[in-house]
Image (cartoon, grey):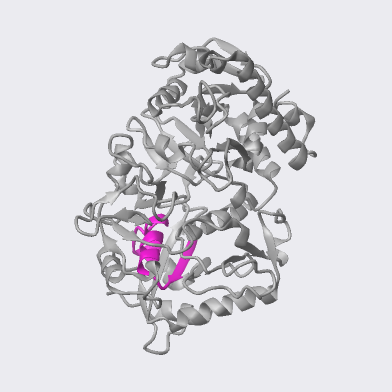
Amino acid sequence: MNIAGDSIKQQLLEAGINCSRPIPTIFYNLTVPELYEAATSFRSSQPRAVDSLPARVTADGALAAFSGERTGRVPQDKRIVDNEASKDIWWGPVNIPLDDSSWEINRNRAIDYLNTRPRLYIVDGFAGWDPEYRIKVRVVACRAYHALFMRNMLMRPQCIEDTQEFETEGPDFYIFNAGEFPANPLTKGMTSTTSVDVNLQDNEMVILGTQYAGEMKKGVFGLMHYLMPKAGVLSLHSSATEGPDGDTTLLFGLSGTGKTTLSADPSRKLIGDDEHCWSDTGVFNIEGGCYAKCLGLSYEKEPDIYNAIKFGSVLENVVMDPITREVDFDDALYTQNTRLCYPIEFMDNAKVPCIAGHPQNIIFLTCDAFGVLPPVSKLTPEQAMYHFIAGYTAKVAGTEVGVTEPEATFSACFGEAFLAFHPTQYAEMLAEKVQKHGCDVWLVNTGWAGGPYGEGERMSLKVTRKIIDGIHDGSLAKAEMETLPVFNLAMPVSCEGVPDEVMIPSKAWSDSAKYNAMLEKLGGMFSANFREKYSDVPDSIKNAGPF
């Protein structure tokens, strides 16, 4: 196995990692087979915990691992150190300040724990495919599966010169993953035994009390949301594809709206499935891999993603037959949030390097569980800013305790949890770029039609793909339009391959009065959200919303 060299060890020593004794052994940028061997051979320090069991290899060759009690992100436990570097941060429920003293306590706690582990895994990689803007990231972890996860999710060094950058200059940003060890809930500013802390002045992130690998991925995304706007680059929670003629499309959307699924389009090249930046020269992917939800995954529904389940990919918290090693993707025993992580090269249609030109089309995906929004509508520039700031989707009954009917969810810029600055700063940058490059902006509903969740039916993936095809071939931009009341959205009345009654949502409901009441109810939710959060935005944007 690859042991860290003297220059890397010296950098780690300066960061507090003990490299002067036999323990811990420092493994550096291990290969996939080496990480498999480590992940399947060594237990953690908690032999009775499910998450402490060695990872296992599935019948398809993927590495299946457990993240323990935490099977998703914990945004309420995320903290940003309050110092000179963070003075412009959008403080509030998304970005919660942490004082220097508590940061030092948590950092020392993490470093001390890592220094007691017999084995540490170091992963060096880049965030961002554009060499002008990429950030050097170093991950220090004590679980091999975490190392493989980040080996997949960061852009891997492509040449000797890339590796030498780390050896001679060191990283721009450290992630110290001590997630097996809890935070002290008595430390000032802590609300539980979990804490994910970022110090933008020291360029470090510390993880305590959660082994969910997605915290590392989104920690890097949050960093880019801070650094890129300062460089005049717009950071985006979106997937991106490129057509045969070089036309680029961005697809925004919250979890469950189809952002990853729809980016796996066999007729287009995949730039990336989740995180991008838009610079003066075009779009580039932040990540080196993809992170897909896999509950209900099947070859029939999503063949490209399903085929990415092979040697080198990571499955989190899935249920697997102990004898056959077959995974049951319909079983949510451990969590609804089962996940699949794989290098972007595992997608047959991936474009590497993951860089494309300026977008021609921008698509906002929403899963409307109220069943009143059209499958597609074309937005004016003002509506584009409004819906980008609103970031609407809906939760459905049964997905969370206490949710008995559809609930509207508003997440600014379709990724509020990762924003460093006020949403209007990103919206203004988006509006400027849309105007400069003449992009068409669309709102696409991947949710329900003919009634709300429990009464209507969810839009089929086939229908949504036909809608996306109509956007790409230009036919929907030329189609006859009707106006959706309350929201004042321009709805194409027809799309090749889609029944006409689906295109106008009121026609799919058997009770028009009930439809109108639900439409006004949802419009009221939009208006209330904007009044509460964005009373200071220009009237031109406010007036682009419902009513």
Query: Which segment is the magenta one?
Result: 136-162
In this picture, is 120 found above or below 271? below
**Residue that sits furthest to the top in the current view:** 480
Q: Nearer the viewer, residue 485 or 264?
A: 485
Q: Nearer the viewer, residue 260 or 348?
A: 260
Indicate the position of residue 522 as horizontal and vertical percent values: 65, 29
**Residue that sits furthest to the left in the current view:** 324
Indicate the position of residue 383 as horizontal and vertical percent values: 66, 27
Name the quadrant of the N terminus.
bottom left
Q: Is residue 137 magenta?
A: yes
**Residue that sits furthest to the bottom in the current view:** 21
State how many labels appear: 0
Horizontal placement of 222 versus 171: left or right?
right
Q: Is residue 334 magenta?
A: no
Indicate the position of residue 86 as horizontal and vertical percent values: 69, 61
Q: Nearer the viewer, residue 58 or 36?
A: 58
Name the quadrant of the C terminus.
top right
In this picture, is 25 found above or below 324? below
In this picture, is 299 found above or below 130? above
Residue 82 image-quadrant placement: bottom right
Residue 63 image-quadrant placement: bottom left
Residue 373 image-quadrant placement: top right
